[in-house]
Image (cartoon, grey):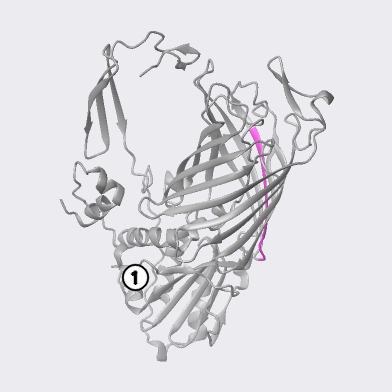
Amino acid sequence: LDYTQDRVSGKKIHPDPAKEKYNFGIVLKSEWGLNGSLSWQRGEEFCFGLSYAFDLSKPVFGGKNKAETPEPLLTDWNETDLEKMASELQSELGKKGFGLRNTVVLAGDKKVHVAYENIGYSSQAEAAARAIILTAHMIPWDTEFCSISSMVRGTPVSRIELNTEKMALIRLHKLNAYDLEDKSAVWAPKTKYGTLPGEEWKVMAGPGESIRNGSADIRIALAYEPRIDRTLQNDYMGRLDIDYIGRLRSSQGWEAYLKVRQPIENDINIWWQPERNDKTRIWKGVLSYIYKLDERAWAVGEVGWLDENYFGGNFWGRYFLEDSPFWIGGRVSVVKERDFNSFAELAEYRRDYYNGKAYYLPINGKNDWRSGYWAEVGYHDTTYNADIIARYGKFIDSDKGYRIDAIRNWNDAYVGFYFTDTDRDTPGKSYTDAGMMLHLPLSFWYAGHPSNTYWDQEFTLLSTFRLFAGVMPGAWMTPESLIGELNPRRLNQELGPLMERLMRDVRDDGQPVVTRKSVYGILEYLSGEYRVREAIQVD
């Protein structure tokens, strides 16, 4: 309880030692999410607080975008024109505005396979759920087997398998989260559309015009960059920007992306971050490629303007262990520093700081190519839908150490923290850097319209020279961004609740009223038992 060195807005908040070495208080919680607290601090003052707990599994401002549910096809397999059925289903899945591209439908002996690329939804699970619901309504009622493959840039990643019973529940709008098996989703084999090797099909429809959907995309978006540093005179600063974004898609593994950022309001004044200036600059501009090595092995690379500070390339490898929550991999980055005063140019010399300003001077040395490399391991926890990623290796400024990311997912949104410790620590700290990561899609706020727009931000919570220690260059599409949501362990976890929500929206049911226990024990939280109790409404 020693707060004598803590500062807010440059001032010490408790310069004198505490009278007592304890705090105590009470916390009051309400069923509607409003919480309060009252405590006696350090034996000398009362403190109170109010907070509101948002349910991040639902849009903050509500909104519904109902799944498309045409009148179910009533004919059985023998009475159905397969070519017409496959063509109509492919056309509906691939029509503009539905959110998919490169849609393909295969039909065989009482079985149907659908493959697609998601371009319209920030959530891969939602794209899969909507494709499944539409498919269930447009195929014969006695279809014995239906499979759905989600592709990324033309490469199948995961495969969802459903039987007659599950498709019937969907047609009746009665499927709930627990009707789907834990292994409904699996890794897709290395075939063109994610079909099983040796499968035979009688009819194929697509991709047709759907291959053109989203091939070129131009948009304008707002962006906000927060900075939190209790050691500065202004402990909270930010910059509001307009982003001009262009995107070219292919179904051969390639994709190009360009983002030009124009500041419109800026109160960030951190002298060791001169890139947070008022200049309009290329913020990201990359050519990206993904290649599937095997069913569970991937290679990803991107080259170009990686972030506001670096130009170069990032290269990753990933291998997902069979029937395991773990993956292993590695990353290599090769970069040159950018000129923070230029729209796109690279600096001739390295950056250094003199008398509170940053300069590119010959005395700093030439701006040569630099590299970093890391061994990586990841773990996905299905109890809390969380990811832990650990990296160890050489950072861009030749310091060696590790970085750990802890990320909590809510479908397509996530909040995470990172911790970096190398052989070059921040002055006054026993580690190098710590900060926060945010990924908030538009659907996080309002779900009334499909969108793949999102806000990404990573920022340090320390007063630290991030270019001089623990540096990992920015990236546009990491393997986690491209295929993380389609990892079958995560897709199985998220697909059921999304399907149930969409079924409820179709039926116009309200959200279920769940009687919650006011208190759970720590073992119930750690084991995940509290989630089961809430789901089945057991007190």
Which amino acid, by three-letter code, is at mark 1?
Ile
Q: In terms of depth relative to the viewer, which is nearer, 457 or 189?
A: 189
- 353 left or right of 107 in image: right
434 versus 203 height, above or below: above
Q: Secondary structure at mark 1?
A: helix
Q: Classify mark 1: residues with Cα within 10 Å, few (<14), some (14-19) or many (20+).
A: many
The range drawn in magenta is 252-262
Q: Is residue 186 magenta?
A: no
Q: In terms of depth relative to the viewer, which is nearer, 42 or 279?
A: 42
In x, y percent, where is residue 478?
A: 59, 51
404 versus 100 height, above or below: above
Q: In terms of depth relative to the viewer, which is nearer, 70 or 369?
A: 369
| Count of numbered circles on the image | 1
In x, y percent, where is residue 285?
A: 70, 46
In x, y percent, where is residue 155?
A: 60, 67
146 versus 262 height, above or below: below
Magenta residues, dominant SS class = strand
In x, y percent, where is residue 520?
A: 22, 44
- On the image, which quarter does residue 41 sit in? top left
- On the image, which quarter does residue 245 sit in? top right
Viewer can see residue 139: no
Identify the residue under disc 1.
170
Q: In terms of depth relative to the viewer, which is nearer, 518 or 70?
A: 518
- 239 left or right of 37 in image: right
Q: Quadrant of the N terminus?
A: top left
